[in-house]
Amino acid sequence: MPGTIGGYGVELFFQCPVKQAGFWSGQWLVDDDLEVCLDQDKRKSLRGTVRVSCPLCGEEHVYAPDALACPLRAAGHDPVKPPNNKGGA
Ligand SMILES: [Zn+2]
């Protein structure tokens, strides 16, 4: 599967270390050396840094991709198993 990184317009949640507050921003940048790695548990992890211009304090912050909240995970996609109740006859 293709790992597309850095789609602008995708809002991510960042934490401002200066204001101690979080904010959503779609104006983030990834460094060129960002790459997707698989660790021993076959979980995807990102190497590199993500930069974002902070609207709270006006400075630029640098984050590790692992520290960012995944928008898909934040949406809470939990597979719901419906009871397999096949009533025949
Ligand atoms: Zn900030």
Image (tube, rainbow, N blue to C red):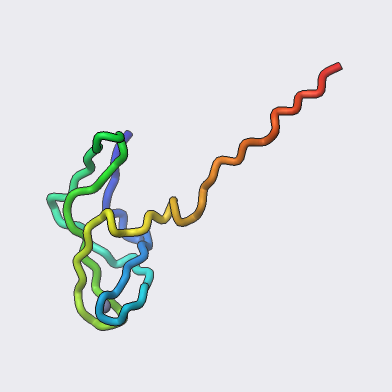
Q: Residue at x 52, y 48 (%)?
A: 77
Quadrant in which residue 84 is drawn: top right
On the image, the x and y values in percent for residue 35 come to 19, 45
Residue situated in front as seen by the camera: 42 or 8: 42
Q: Is residue 13 left or right of residue 87?
A: left
Horizontal and vertical percent for residue 10? 37, 59
Tell me which corner region of the image, top left, top right, bottom left or bottom right, holds residue 78: top right
Q: Quadrant of the N terminus?
A: top left
Judge from the rendering whether residue 85 lies leftward or rightward of residue 47; answer left or right.
right
Looking at the image, which residue sits at the far front?
40
62 relative to 65, above or below: below
Left or right of residue 51: residue 13: right
Q: Residue at x 13, y 53 (%)?
A: 32
Residue at (32, 67) in percent of width and height:
14
In the rendered image, the residue lying farthest to the right is: 89
Count up the numbered dots.
0
Q: Position of residue 6 (x, y in %)?
A: 27, 54
Q: Is residue 83 above or below residue 8?
A: above
Query: What residue lies at 19% left-to-right and 74% top-to-bottom?
Result: 60
Ligand 1 located in image quadrant? bottom left
Could you say which is closer to the camera, residue 80 or residue 29? 80
**60 and 81: which one is in front?**
81
- Above or below, 13 against 82 in this view is below
Name the quadrant containing residue 61: bottom left
In percent of width and height, residue 89 lies at 86, 16
Extreme residue in the top direction: 89
